Amino acid sequence: MTSHKDLKVWQKGIDLVKLIYEITSSFPTNEQFGLVSQMRRAAVSIPSNIAEGCGRNSDKELVHFLYICLGSASELETQIIISQELDFLEKEKSEQIQILVFEIIKMTSSHIKSIKVRTEI
């Protein structure tokens, strides 16, 4: 298997982390330990769980960590919507992030499906 760094979904996850850190830096300071912290943790969790799953020695564990990645992506998607509803995030930026999150969800789901078909997990 190639390195997790070669996976397009991991690379998109890193791009997402950078984008989340960029946009949350302009959120109100009173959200620093609230929404900002949660969004950053959820975003970092996405490529981190892809990397951890790839570092394991079994397809079953990889699939487990990819499911965690999907959970974090869904969590982040909700937090993006909340941020827009609270006027912390402009609509265009929100849509840009949601598109990237959707791509990551789609790619991760496809990766899970291909592993399950290949290994009959």
Image (cartoon, rainbow, N blue to C red):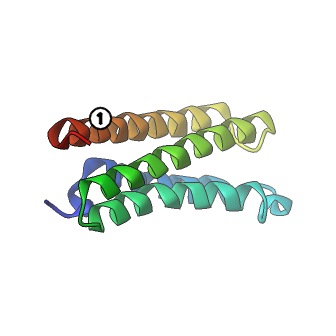
Give residue 74's position: percent from left, percent from top. Answer: 56, 40
Residue occupying the point 46% across, 54% down: 46
What's under tag 1, amino acid-wise?
Ser
Q: Name the residue under label 1.
A: 110
Q: In which quarter of the image is the C terminus?
A: top left
In this rendering, the count of numbered labels is 1
**Picture layout, residue 15 above or below residue 83:** below
Residue 26 seen in the figure? no
**Picture layout, residue 25 above or below residue 117:** below
Q: Looking at the image, which residue sits at the far right? A: 30
Residue occupying the point 48% across, 40% down: 101
106 vs 79, left or right, is: left
Question: Looking at the rendering, which quadrant does residue 37 occupy?
Answer: bottom right
Q: What element carries label 1?
A: helix
Give residue 84's position: percent from left, percent from top. Answer: 72, 36
Give residue 11's position: percent from left, percent from top. Answer: 32, 54
Residue 85 seen in the figure? yes
Residue occupying the point 28% across, 41% down: 111
